[in-house]
Amino acid sequence: MKLLRIDSSARSQASDRSSRGSHTRRLTERFTRRWLQQRPNDVLISRDVGQSPPHPVAEKWIGAAFTKPDQREPWMKEALAESDALINELIAADLVVAGVPMYNFGMPAQFKAYIDNVVRVGRTFGFDRSRPDDPYTPLLAGMDKRLILLGSRGDYGYDPGGRIAHINHVEGAIRDVFAFLGVTAFHSVAIEYDEFGGDRLQASIAAAEGAVDELVDRLAGARQAVYPPCLNRASTFSPP
């Protein structure tokens, strides 16, 4: 299997290493480390959009993306090179582990830029004008991909049924975008109470880490049953 770890926090260090560190980096590191302990032949690709954000979609990008591939000029291919690299990583991945903190009730701009670069007609979704009532096709469907979203929030009560769940625009938005592309297997874990600190924050961290461990154990065990060691798929991969 191939794991794609995406970190989008503006903080460069994990919170278990720095008092000002990122909770989402803490969770993505824990998830991938535990996964590889159980499945050491799997391959991890890391993409840090928090520290190296993709370029936002611009006019040249739009012009290039909506030009048929065989009609693109050299500058168009250059304009889409970063998008192509991100999409190739996503297509190659079996498991996407995304660390996405909540910034002002939504995802960080860095992760939105990532999404805007990988949601691309002809690469990750299709559009057919001859089907006016249902023109879209999710091109990543049927690939058995799974999205793990690991989040953090300053306040608390953002989960479904919580006191301020109605202003959580992170998990739902990201889940819907990936489902549009065909990735419908989705799991999420989040740390809350960051702005409060103290015992409530520590309890939330402990609960989230426990949930991550349980999720890894369950998913890695299920994958191991499907692909026993002697039948593991290719375990080497070089990102484009």
Image: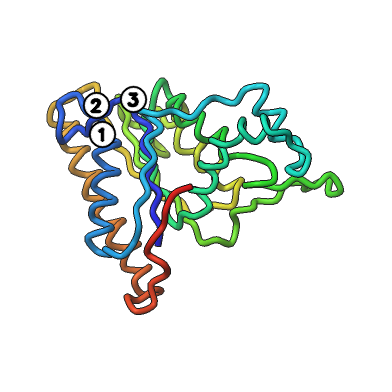
Badge 1 marks a residue whose secondary structure is helix
CA distance for labels 2 and 3: 15 Å
CA distance for labels 1 and 3: 11 Å
Specify the amino acid type for callout 1: His
Residue drawn at x 34%, y 32% is: 157
Please provide percent x and percent y for residue 140.
59, 54
Residue marked by disc 1: 23
Badge 3 marks a residue whose secondary structure is loop
Residue 45 shown left or right of residue 35 in the figure: right
Please provide percent x and percent y for residue 166.
47, 29
Residue marked by disc 2: 194
Q: On screen, 8 above or below 211?
A: above
Q: Are marks 2 and 3 in contact (CB under 8 Å)?
A: no
Q: Are marks 1 and 2 in contact (CB under 8 Å)?
A: yes
Residue marked by disc 3: 10
Please provide percent x and percent y for residue 186.
45, 51
